[in-house]
Image (tube, rainbow, N blue to C red):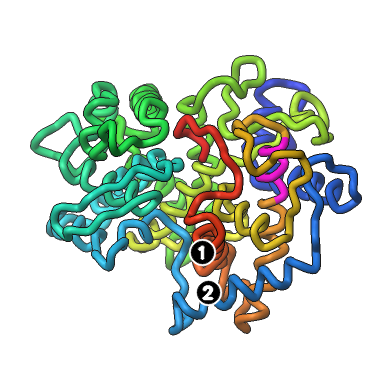
Amino acid sequence: MTAAVPDTRTPAGAVRALRSTAAVRQRAQQLLARARAGASHAFAVDDAALSVAARTVAELTRQRFPDGRIPYHSRWRHFEAGGVDRAGQLDALLGPVDAATRARAQIDLALVSVLLDAGAGPQWTYREAASGQNFSRSEGLGVASFHAFTGGLFSSDPLQPLRVDAAGLAVLSAECLGDAFQVTADNPLVGLAGRTQVLRQLGEALKAQPDTFGPAGRPGGLYDALCHAAAADTEPVRTIAAHHILVLLLNTLSAIWPAQNTIHGLALGDCWQHPAVASEGLTAGWMPFHKLSQWLTYSLLEPFEWSGLRVTGIDALTGLPEYRNGGLLIDAGVLRPLPNGWATRSWSAGDAFIVEWRALTVALLDELAPLVRAELGLSAEQMPLACVLEGGTWAAGRALAQRLRNGLPPLNIVSDGTVF
């Protein structure tokens, strides 16, 4: 049965319409077409540079994965930082539990870790006692959140430390989170207060929805909710669609994001206004991204697959509009910023310039992906977008930033720890 088209004249219908990757893509493509026509005051597009960028990404992919086995772009890659198998460590800590119990713990870990994965800033590092290694940026946040989780920081039950629950998040303080992340005056973490607030609001959302997250309010309840939907599947292997994971996340957790982006009081999350976005009803002028929710969806693919389910329609998800993928496009010359002083001034997530940059990133990643596959001789089935990102565009963006600016992104974005 085909789902009814949302009535965008109503607040609920408008929000539903914006909680779709189809809306993300359509509006991103609209802004890209506008920029290509020379009508943008923010960016010019050099299409000739796109093939050069694809070769750069393909070359790096070959270097990183010479055997051609490219994993998903996922938080689980950061748990492998420094060559340490932390997923295996979690398995060992969990012991001989069934697949569902293991998946719930993995989902608990992935969800809080992704929500903590906004930009760390250039000064922060984390030292892992067991390996003696220092980590920064996304890898550091991943390793720090892994140890915070296994240390029971997010659980209210000392006898069950390997979980996240609503009561544990309710009492989380910035001081405790800062201690777990080794934050000091000399080791500052950008957006610590914002990260803490998002996790506390997550606890409130989990507690308010026991039908999805169970009486304890655990993120791992997503496993049961989605498995229940897959139970009626007649195929030998139960399947769930990647977009169903995303929509469930958006429908249950959108209220955790800062509330400045709303339609008649209904939270939109990572969805921002841009004057050139043409659309109908109350969605007019809104450009949705849902970056962290999509990053979380990518990071939940493996826990579901490891439990024996098959995830379909992975390419329904979009590329992630953050400063590595977007930085690749600027540093490779595909996007040329037009405002004076664009590289030295400070920007906020809601600035039309940043909204447009992120939209163009989404649209251009869709165009870059087939070019990368052609360079590598791989099909879309062999290399879905999740693998292009990992191979890939994110790593190439980081490499170019390291070469050009000692790792700093091309734009100075003021972060509260909830978007970038």
Mark 2, other Cα within 10 Å: few <14 / some 14–19 / many ≥20: some
Check residue 310 for magenta coloring: no
Residue 2 visible in the displayed image: no
Q: Earlier in the sequence, mark 1 or mark 2?
A: 2
Task: Name the residue tied to disc 2.
Answer: 60
Task: Name the residue tied to disc 1.
Answer: 399
Q: Measuring from the top left, give residue 131's x and y in whole percent.
A: 17, 60
Q: Do the residues labelled 1 and 2 touch (CB within 8 Å)?
A: yes
Q: Measuring 67% from the left and 35% from the top, which residue is drawn there?
A: 18
Say which of 220 and 369 sits in front. Answer: 369
Q: In this view, does 84 lie above or below 202?
A: below
Q: Measuring 22% from the left and 29% from the top, which residue is drawn there?
A: 176
Query: Quadrant of residue 224 in the image?
Result: top left
Q: Which residue lies furthest to the left in this view?
A: 159
Of circles 1 and 2, which is in front?
1
What number is the disc on residue 135?
none
Q: Is mark 2 on a helix, strand or loop?
A: helix
Residue 102 visible in the displayed image: yes
The span picked out in magenta is 353-360
Please give left or right for residue 241 compared with residue 108 in the image: right
Please give left or right for residue 285 compared with residue 290 in the image: right
**Three-letter residue code for mark 2:** Leu
Say which of 312 and 323 sits in front. Answer: 323
Say which of 264 and 37 sits in front. Answer: 37
Q: Measuring from the top left, give residue 81's x and y in whole percent.
A: 31, 61
Q: Is mark 1 on a helix, strand or loop?
A: helix
Q: Measuring 73% from the left and 66% from the top, which residue is drawn there?
A: 50
Query: Quadrant of residue 71 in the image?
Result: bottom left
